[in-house]
Image (cartoon, grey):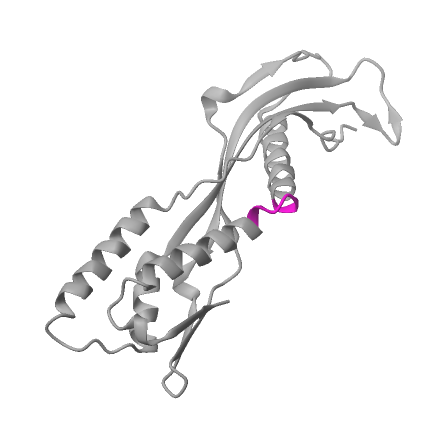
């Protein structure tokens, strides 16, 4: 009976991380709002409330703060297993190289805001960083050393299952290298910069956790 084995651990070729502030659109939109608010604030005294700040953060939705770029190569290999006995001449395998981009950030719509008028303190609690997307451009995929075994042919399921396992492994590696930590830190810096543009914020101590 044929039994598809899990692919072997991938061979890492050129792994690199590129940390960039990718939430440019969100930044522009927020900055435009705050500048507009600042202009209107000249005519009326701004009132800082938890609802107001929460609405501005929710308007940004997902703030993508970090991109993780990598190049990887992995090998898939499988052999027909008959009740624990590996059937000779039934091995199928292929090697794939590919590039990928993992984007991570925070979902600002779930941020919690507290305004303490007594102490003039604003506390914003951001959610933990999370992976927002993981793309492998089709044009970057190259297949090498693909076998053509009559008794155990390569199937579409082999490719899709292998790709799924590879993506999961790369996401785990990125997390272990601090991707989500970097996403949280950059999101914190961005939110602090955005909120500082809101009229009336200079009267409060801002704490982001």
Residue 63 pos. (x, y %): 40, 52
For the magenta stretch, what is the residue range?
175-180
Front residue (pair 31, 99)? 31
The residue located at (59%, 31%) in the rendering is 163
Query: Relative to residue 178, is residue 35 depicted above or below?
Result: below
**Left or right: where 96 falls relative to 67:** right
On screen, residue 120 above or below 139: below
Q: Is residue 102 left or right of residue 57?
A: right
Q: Answer yes or no: is residue 152 visible.
A: no
Q: Position of residue 2 (x, y in %)?
A: 76, 28
Would you say residue 208 sits in the magenta stretch?
A: no
User: Residue 170 at x, y = what percent?
Assistant: 62, 37
Rendered view: 203 above or below 168: below
- On the rendered structure, is 155 left or right of 208? right
- Please name the residue shown 50% across and 50% down the image: 183
Majority secondary structure in the magenta region: helix
Compare residues 92 and 55 and report the one nearer the observer. Answer: 55
Q: Is residue 173 visible?
A: yes
Q: Residue furthest front?
A: 202
Compared to residue 34, the image places residue 97 above or below, namely above
Is 21 positioned to the left or the right of 69 in the image?
A: left
The x, y position of residue 17, in whole percent, is 55, 35
Q: Quadrant of residue 3?
A: top right
Residue reaching furthest to the bottom? 118
In terms of image quadrants, where is residue 159? top right
Q: Residue at x 63, y 30 (%)?
A: 162
Q: Is residue 176 magenta?
A: yes
């Amino acid at each position: 009976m044929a039994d598809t084995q899990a692919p072997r651990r991938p061979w890492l070729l050129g792994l690199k991380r590129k940390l960039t502030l990718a939430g440019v659109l969100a930044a522009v939109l927020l900055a435009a709002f705050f500048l507009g608010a600042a202009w209107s604030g000249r005519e009326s005294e701004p009132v800082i409330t938890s609802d107001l700040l929460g609405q501005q953060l929710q308007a940004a939705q997902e703030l993508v703060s970090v991109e993780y770029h990598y190049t990887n190569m992995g090998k898939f290999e499988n052999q027909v297993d008959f009740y624990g006995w590996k059937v000779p001449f039934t091995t199928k395998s292929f090697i794939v190289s590919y590039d990928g981009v993992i984007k991570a950030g925070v979902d600002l719509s779930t941020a919690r805001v507290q305004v303490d008028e007594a102490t003039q303190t604003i506390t914003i609690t951001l959610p933990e960083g999370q992976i927002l997307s993981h793309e492998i451009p089709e044009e970057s995929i190259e297949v090498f050393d693909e076998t053509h075994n009559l008794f155990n042919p390569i199937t579409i399921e082999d490719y899709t299952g292998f790709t799924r396992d590879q993506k999961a492994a790369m996401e785990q590696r990125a997390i272990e290298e601090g991707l989500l930590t970097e996403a949280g830190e950059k999101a914190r810096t961005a939110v602090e910069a955005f909120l500082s543009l809101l009229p009336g914020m200079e009267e409060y101590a801002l704490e982001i956790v």
